[in-house]
Amino acid sequence: MIIDKDDVTFRAIIESGFVDKTGLIAHLNNKAIGKLRHFIFMSRPHGFGKSVTIEMLNAYYSKSCNCSDIFDKLKISQDPTYEENLNKHNVLCVDMQSFDHPNSSADDYFDNFHKDLCEDLKTKYPLAFDNCDRYDFVDAIARVNKIYHETFIFLIDNWDYIIRKYHDTELTNYLMGLWRELFKSSQCEDCFSLVYMTGIYPLVKGKTQSDVNNFQEYTMIHPMELPDCLGFTEDETKALCLKSGMSYEEVKEWIGAYPLSGKQIFNPQYVVKICKSKNFALEIKQDEILKHVPKAVRKMVPKGKKLFVELLNKGYSDSRSHYTAFNGDISDLYGLDAMFAYLIHLGYLALDSDQQIVRLINGELKTALTCAFAAGLLAR
């Protein structure tokens, strides 16, 4: 179900070990929900708990859940907004990967999006589909709002799935057009009390005023005031290391930390993997790197060979670079600044914005990239 999703997955997460990130909920309650700027975008690399966050937000906000037994014990329970929002909202919870059905093509993707969402809405709001001869989610959510006077929290995971899979300009443009209709048009302006969107890439930026520019964006380059919500903090990582009998200093040395807004932030997947297995091998493989680094980026490496070698050795520094050249559209990726920005969003590079230094995040990644570079794989 896309609407009225249950809390089964989140309860399983709690049982397996959950690091309290409900500070994000407090931020959303106080700064976003029901307010003019209620569109929130957070991009993070693989392994940073994006889907866990979606499950947490659904379990807290959704009327279909009853999770006071969980959240009463977490930090959000100390916030004045806690009870007024706990399981009080209609929530649409969407994983954009789910519309890539087995045996379907890229051409079917958006048809699946509209059909799946509308069929789910129709089970609860049938009057909105009277005299409706086609499935269009934008029209459907607007009719639900008009007829039933219902508003929604919209949680979107893997927003960039179709972009990352196909690197197709036409599909990217359609997706961004869909977001404009949903989040910038007058037709849907009263439909959502909160939109929370997450993925790996930053939002695609174009050159017109009709772009989706009403989101507050939090990324690995611009974490703003929410670095604690992007990954594990030093204190959280130290606590997990202590519990598992691992040396925090050794773990930090091996996996590396991202300097975000003056704080050291760690990849949660790496921390949990090492603490559970007590094995420092992250198993970062060349083929995994090549899978996530597209040909357009790989071809830039030989052109900037000197800079790449500098990056491998001690980090790359250029005060003229702002690492904003990657606009979320992989088909429009040009220049070394764009390459570095792209790799920062993937989590392969860490940016120290105070010193304007970019470096590889850890030694295992450095070894994998060095081998790929020496073998000429990055130029293919």
Image: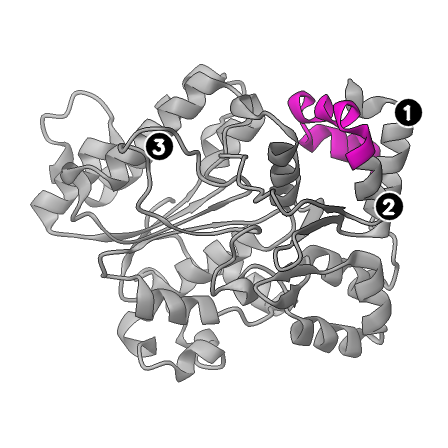
The residue at 14%/37% (across/down) is 187
**Which secondary structure class fits the magenta region best?**
helix
Asked if marks 3 and 2 touch (Cβ < 8 Å), the reply is: no
Q: Quick one: label 1 or label 3, which is nearer the N terminus?
A: 3
Q: Is residue 134 left or right of residue 82?
A: left
Instruction: Look at mark 3 in the image and give the residue it sits on.
Output: 116
Q: Quick one: label 3 or label 2, which is nearer the N terminus?
A: 3
**Quarter of image, res 326:** top right
**Quarter of image, res 133:** top left
Q: Position of residue 119 (x, y in %)?
A: 29, 34
Q: Residue 313 has which mark?
A: 2
Q: Amino acid at mark 3?
A: Asp
Q: Nearer the viewer, mark 1 or mark 2?
A: 2
Residue 29 visible? The answer is yes
Q: Amino acid at mark 2?
A: Asn
Q: Position of residue 240 (x, y in %)?
A: 73, 73
The image's colouring method is one colour
Instruction: Look at mark 1 in the image and give the residue it sits on.
Output: 375
Q: Residue 67 has which mark?
A: none
Q: Position of residue 17 (x, y in %)?
A: 64, 68
